Amino acid sequence: MDWDVTVVGGGPTGVMLASEVRQHGVRVLVLERDAEPTRVVRALGLHARSIELLDQRGLLDRFLAVGTQYPLGGSFAGISKPAPARLDTAHPYVLGIPQPTTERLLTEHATELGVEIRRGRDVVGLSQDDSGVTVDLADGTRLRSRYLVGCDGGRSTVRKLLGVGFPGEPARREWLSGEVELTASPEEVAAVVTAVRETQKGFGVGPSGAGLYRVVVPAEGVAEDRSVPPTLEEVRQRLRVVAGTDFGVHSPRWLSRFGDATRQAERYRTGRVLLAGDAAHVHPPTGGQGLNLGLQDAVNLGWKLAAEVNGWAPEGLLDSYSTERHPVAADVLNTTRAQAELLSTEPGPQAVRRLIADLMDLDEVNRYLVEKVTAIGVRYDVGEGHRLLGRRLRDLALTRGRLYALMHRGRGLLLDQTGRLSVAGWADRVDSVVDVSEELDVPAALLRPDGHVAWVGDDQRDLLGHLPRWFGAAAG
């Protein structure tokens, strides 16, 4: 067997997943079709839950050093409201950072862990049996691994080779985007954008650094092949139609197009092959959830896949990736569909938009929508009981530090405020920390490696009944 895990796709989801698996000693290979990293900026920022995950892995400082923190306000379909009071996160901001930078930082981390990344490798064939997966590359190379994960985007080759259905709606609208230089003054640009956005929420022109501007403008129709970028003249023409001026656009760094297709894979696992990120779900970019959703897929899947490879995964653990993440993505698709409708300039959607704007003045409504978009409201079904069960735990101040600083190794964690509990038998998979926090109102909490609460209580026998569900049998 050449590898334990092959990851197809070297974007943010793929390299994050590779790192999550690799930190548990698993041999992992990333295959990326493109010979060079893309310069196309498809995502502009990270939401609170993704920021938390980076903090849990000790990576956040790298991102804070190159990103910009924007106060987290209620923003649904471009409807801006003040942030809800006392939001349940230690990171109540959006971290502005272009996708190529996110990909670079995550790739550096993966390389440091020993992940092998091979660029310019195009997967053209796939087969599997009871012991592993074989992939055929365009150059004639054949590789074999125990498991394979397709993180190769919305047009996923892996998903198509598996024959997994991708039901949903095709794109009805399309936008042209790019990073360009302008001859128009910043004052003119700002004035025109303000006027146009009163009715065209899907339009924008703003500085992106180094004298460049990021342009997003509605296209005339939907292209047959969105992988073919628009021409500069096409961008100019659409700017004149929508904004009345092309701002003297010239010298593009990159140009691209995107649509509002909404689709989700029928299943996330087929034998030894799994799907994550855009390979599993695509949706309109409204709310900026796509990249974030993929990173969160990776962290949910990584430790479970590593447990399977390392031989201690309890029955059903790997399948729980799909049962937990499929409903989360379905909810995101529903939310982005709603936001896309509210961006319409038609009278009906505009009337609903005004109603939603009024409702967002209610703190409970505003909080509900913010928690949806940022994913801090996600709750997995781990059983009935305390309100914390299934939810991720925010970073807590402890007497000797903080919670997320204890989670860098991606292991389970028992935070024990009683000093009476033990994870003996699982110490190779679960860390035990005796400490207290004024912010935690339960005697002890068992956290999975992704930070979600699997158990709360103070009874050792009850704890021993829950540890095997997530961490397998005790070591002999």
Image (tube, rainbow, N blue to C red):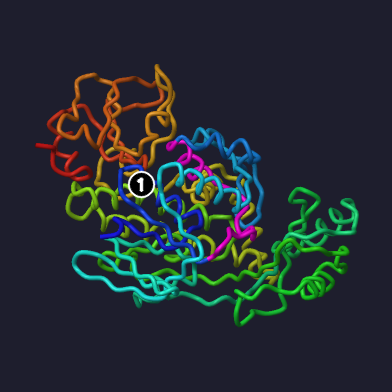
Q: Which corner quadrant holds the C terminus?
A: top left
Q: Is residue 54 magenta?
A: yes
- 357 or 15, nearer to the observer: 15
Query: Above or below — where is 126 with respect to 300?
Result: below
Does residue 167 appear left or right of residue 317 in this picture? right
Residue 73 x/y as whole percent = 62, 43
Q: Residue at position x 44%, y 62% from top?
A: 31
Q: Is residue 465 magenta?
A: no
State left or right for residue 455 relative to residue 211.
left
On-image quarter of the N terminus:
bottom left
The spot of residue 424 in percent (x, y) is 16, 29
Label 1 is placed on what type of residue?
Answer: Arg
Element marked by disc 1: helix
Residue 204 quadrant: bottom right
Spot occupied by residue 323 in the image (x, y as percentages of width and height): 30, 58
Numbered-mark total: 1
Residue sitting at 35 percent across and 46 percent down? 22
Relative side of 352 to 244, left or right = left
Residue lying farthest left? 476
Residue at horizontal 34 percent and vertical 73 percent from the top: 126
Give the residue displayed 45% in from the left and 52% down from the top: 15
Residue 168 percent coordinates (x, y): 46, 74
Quadrant location of residue 179?
A: bottom right
- The residue closer to the viewer here, 187 or 327, is 187
The answer to whether residue 169 is visible is: yes
Residue at label 1?
A: 22
Q: What is the residue that sits farthest to the bottom in this orientation?
A: 224
Answer above or below: position of 309 versus 471: below
Q: Which residues are magenta?
A: 34-57
Number of other residues with Cα within 10 Å of mark 1, as a class: few under 14, some 14 to 19, many 20 or more: many
Tell which of 313 and 170 is nearer to you: 313
Relative to 337, say whether 163 is above or below: below
